[in-house]
Image: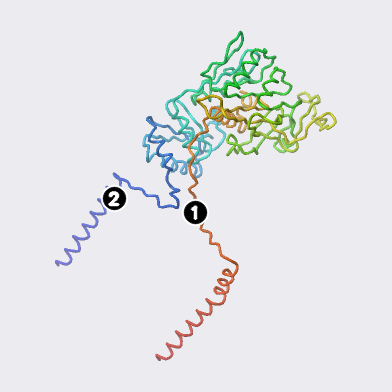
Amino acid sequence: MRGGFGRLVHALLCLALAGLVGFLSTRFGFRSDWSAARGASLAPQSVQLLERLDASVDVISYAGDGGTLRQAIAAFVARYREYKPDITLQFVDPAADPAAMRALGVRVDGEIELRYRGRSERVQRLTEQEFSNALLRLSRTQERMVAFLSGDGERKPDGSANADLGQFTALLLAQGVRCVPLVLGSGARIPDNTDLLVIANPRSTIAAPVVAEIIDWVERGGALLWLVEPDESAGLEALADTLSVRVLPGLLVDGSGASLGLGDPSFVALSQYPDHAITRGLEQTTLLPQAVALAQLTKPRWQVQPLLRSSAQSWSETGVMPKAGESTATIRFDADIDEMRGPLDLAFALQRLSPRPDRREQRAVVIGDGDFVSNQFLGNGGNRELGQRVFNWLLADDALIEVPDRGAPDRLIRMSQARLSVIGVGLLIGLPMVLVLAGGGIAWRRRRRR
């Protein structure tokens, strides 16, 4: 009787202990990453960033209700919430209101928007490096000033017309970048607090004193983005020489667009990009309507790197292009009139040591198209993403978190051919022989016992 009572007490104590452990597990947590190279936890750089954020972060995921994408995103965000509990996560089904998603610029299922202190950033790839870098850009409190040259028919940074850039600059404003028009003339100078000067397709010739001020701005170490259109006569040849580039005559046409359903050969679609910090990891197709090709001058004063490049089926067309609705069958490459066959460069990224003491490097970008970030074409493919990457690089916002490669270590065993042969013979012949001998020995011992 006493033994049975003791066993009952022991069982009750075990149940009570299990219940206590279960209760404490809901109040206190402990997590340890035993995976190879700690690949299942955040890098120390990301943890340090989260500790510096002094306000809540709202995460909005535009992921469909079906499948396991939402669960993967929730598990990913949970790794960040472990160090910063005031990160909120909200899911929005993009299929519920496709028109609203297009207006927001959502193009990828699972795209994530991060909001912090009234600013926002977008993430299209669910990786720690992309997510942490977006948080890092949001954490920067210094407002950037971008001046758009105005007064000669340029695209308006705050305009709503198809050719203007109002929608794109609104996205920049949400990231802490203020875009203002700048009219130069009568001895006016580009303000020293300007972080970037943008020349967006002037329609008339720019006055010589203004061109001289732009060149002086570049020589002083200022960052520059120059958007060029075919047959643009703005009087900026001296600026092109300063940047060590040349604008090729004619309009770039590309026959490879037919495979993507583009009926107009003057629309250049790009899905592969030269390796550069701006285009690295860009997987979307960008669309450049009526672009112009660029060339690099010999003995450049800059480090010039191609940023966008057309296909081998492209060339610079200097003839008369058919009007809208007319057949394009007459467009042919003609080497006799100095047309150049592709691949041709459509954009250059330029770098050199900065003459300014507060900056280590001076940067500039020249792109043979301005339509890709216009209100009319911003929503096409990766145009929005490319535009933001260009501005981030020019504003030196690419000094971001580098998450080290924490993949599993290499477990490959390297052996000579002789050792591989020995192992093969052992497995095919030696091991079966050992098993046969062992079985024979066991059978022989059993017979002797009988």
Residue at 56% across, 69% down: 419
On screen, residue 402 versus residue 84, left or right, reads right
Residue named by callout 1? 409
Q: Position of residue 92 (x, y in %)?
A: 48, 34
Q: Residues within 10 Å of mark 2 (few under 14, many from 20)?
A: few
- In the rendered structure, which amino acid carries the disc numbered 2? Gly
CB under 8 Å between callouts 1 and 2? no
**Camera-side residue: 312 or 352?**
352
The alpha-carbon separation of the residues under discs 1 and 2 comes to 36 Å
Quadrant in the picture for residue 343: top right
**Camera-side residue: 284 or 26?**
284
- In the rendered structure, which amino acid carries the disc numbered 1? Pro
Q: Position of residue 5 (x, y in %)?
A: 16, 63
Residue named by callout 2? 22
In this picture, is 108 found above or below 406?
Answer: above
In this picture, is 253 found above or below 126?
Answer: above
Q: Position of residue 270 (x, y in %)?
A: 67, 35
Quadrant in the picture for residue 243: top right
